[in-house]
Amino acid sequence: MASNKAYLDFILDQLSSLGGIAHRPMMGEYILYCWGKAFGGIYDDRFLLKPTKNVLRLAEESGMPPVMELPYEGAREMLAPDPDDRERLCELVRAAAEDLPAPKKKAARGSM
């Protein structure tokens, strides 16, 4: 089931204070990037976040057990944060982006 663009727009609005947020459509879903790093996505109208070390630590510190969901069959579990809590959402995305490695540079085409 493809995700609704209105839900993507809602999540992008929730994350607007971070700056540097981008998205790319991928087979009816959306991959989300912060500072060029893929930190999560929209899957079946659910915002899911990569469970990095600091993301899990922040989720556990909130006093509520982290909710983990599968984005699609055969994938690794991802964190499903409350999309209505703008401040917390930004905190978790910032933590994920800081934990993730910088994107690899692509080789120039046609160089021989």
Image (cartoon, rainbow, N blue to C red):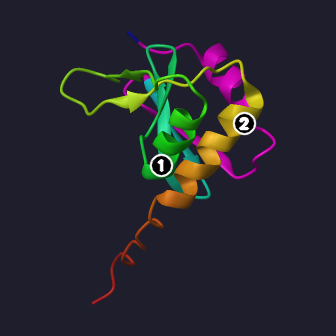
Point out residue 30 in the picture as x, y percentages from the top left corner: 49, 30
Q: Is residue 94 left or right of residue 69?
A: right
* Quadrant of residue 32 within the rendered picture: top right
Q: Secondary structure at mark 2?
A: loop
Classed neighbour count for the residue bearing mark 1: other residues with Cα under 10 Å, few (<14), some (14–19), many (≥20): many
Q: Nearer the viewer, residue 20 or 59?
A: 59
Point 38% across, 9% down: residue: 1
Q: Check the image and name the residue furthest to the bottom.
A: 112
In space, the residues marked 2 and 1 are separated at their CA atoms by 14 Å
Point out residue 51 in the picture as x, y percentages from the top left corner: 42, 41
Residue 13 visible in the displayed image: no
Tell me if residue 89 is in the magenta stretch. Answer: no
Q: Amino acid at mark 1?
A: Ala
Q: Split into 4 quadrants, where in the image is the C terminus? A: bottom left
Point 43% across, 51% down: residue: 53
Q: Check the image and name the residue furthest to the right.
A: 17
Q: Which residue is mark 1?
A: 38
Tell me if residue 18 is in the magenta stretch. Answer: yes
Point out residue 33 in the picture as x, y percentages from the top left corner: 55, 47
Point 61% across, 20% down: residue: 82
Q: Amino acid at mark 2?
A: Leu
**As drawn, 15 above or below 105:** above
Classed neighbour count for the residue bearing mark 2: other residues with Cα under 10 Å, few (<14), some (14–19), many (≥20): many
Q: Nearer the viewer, residue 49 or 109?
A: 49
Q: Earlier in the sequence, mark 2 or mark 1?
A: 2
Q: Is residue 12 left or right of residue 23?
A: right
Tell me the magenta residue range: 2-28
Q: Is residue 22 left or right of residue 107?
A: right
Point 61% across, 31% down: residue: 62
Q: Which residue is mark 2?
A: 15
Residue 91 visible in the displayed image: yes
